[in-house]
Image (cartoon, grey):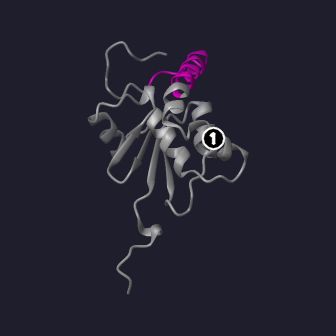
């Protein structure tokens, strides 16, 4: 018997995002990671879960950025999208474009706030409430 653990038995990578945001949901549904990296599991940030409790305990505002968890490491916002681009498959136009746009940490730090701003406008127009996982007073609307 081999001492190495098959990837299928490894803990999945968790991508935590706002499923009620159409842009976020479409992105997360379309991103594909390399099979050699493992399995990507999507988690709705609006549902109570152990990973949301961990994100809140870390002081990360999920309304300001998605979170990618790999092992014990949390990648937040632009770091999450940058990490996703590096482990993403290059199959399909979307994944190639995702890699090209976010493979640079600097580009990710510049582009991500623009995406976050667009998300805030979209959710405001849709009259969605914030998740407000940090429990900040008077912080329920975009």
What residue is at 62 percent from the left and 31 percent from the top?
23
> Residue 7's spot in the image, x, y percent?
46, 68
Q: Is residue 108 depicted above or below 74 in this figure?
A: above
Q: Residues within 10 Å of mark 1 (few under 14, many from 20)?
A: some
- Under circle 1, the secondary element is helix
Extreme-top residue of the structure: 138
Q: Main secondary structure of the magenta part?
A: helix
What residue is at 45 percent from the left and 53 percent from the top?
13
Extreme-right residue of the structure: 93
> Residue 119's spot in the image, x, y percent?
56, 23
86 relative to 63 in the view: left or right: right
> Residue 103's spot in the image, x, y percent?
55, 41
Extreme-left residue of the structure: 57
What residue is at 53 percent from the left and 51 percent from the top?
87
Q: Tell me, yes or no, whether the highlighted magenta stretch contains residue 106.
A: no
Whether residue 106 is visible to the viewer of this picture, yes or no, is: yes
Q: Is residue 5 depicted above or below 95 in this figure?
A: below
Question: For this rendering, which residue is in front, 116 or 56?
Answer: 116
Q: Is residue 124 depicted above or below 13 in this figure?
A: above
> Residue 67's spot in the image, x, y percent?
43, 39
Label 1, on which residue?
A: 100
What residue is at 44 percent from the left and 26 percent from the top?
63
Question: For this rendering, which residue is in front, 37 or 16?
Answer: 37
Q: Is residue 88 depicted above or below 107 in this figure?
A: below
Rendering quarter of residue 114: top right
- Magenta stretch bounds: 112-130
Q: Tell me, yes or no, whether the highlighted magenta stretch contains residue 116.
A: yes
Question: For this rendering, which residue is in front, 98 or 5?
Answer: 98
Whether residue 49 is visible to the viewer of this picture, yes or no, is: no
Q: Quadrant of the N terminus?
A: bottom left
């Amino acid at each position: 018997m081999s001492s190495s653990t098959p990837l299928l038995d490894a803990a999945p990578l968790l991508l935590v995002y706002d499923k009620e945001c159409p842009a976020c949901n479409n992105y997360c549904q379309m991103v594909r990671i390399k099979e050699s990296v493992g399995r990507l599991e999507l988690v709705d940030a609006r549902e109570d879960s152990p990973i949301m409790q961990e994100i809140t305990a870390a002081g990360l505002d999920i309304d300001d950025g998605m979170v990618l968890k790999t092992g014990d490491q949390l990648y937040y916002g632009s770091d999450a999208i940058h990490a996703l681009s590096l482990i993403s498959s290059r199959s399909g136009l979307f994944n190639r474009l995702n890699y090209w746009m976010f493979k640079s940490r600097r580009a990710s730090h510049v582009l991500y706030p623009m995406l976050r701003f667009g998300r805030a406008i979209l959710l405001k127009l849709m009259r969605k409430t914030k998740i407000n996982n940090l429990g900040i007073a008077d912080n329920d609307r975009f």
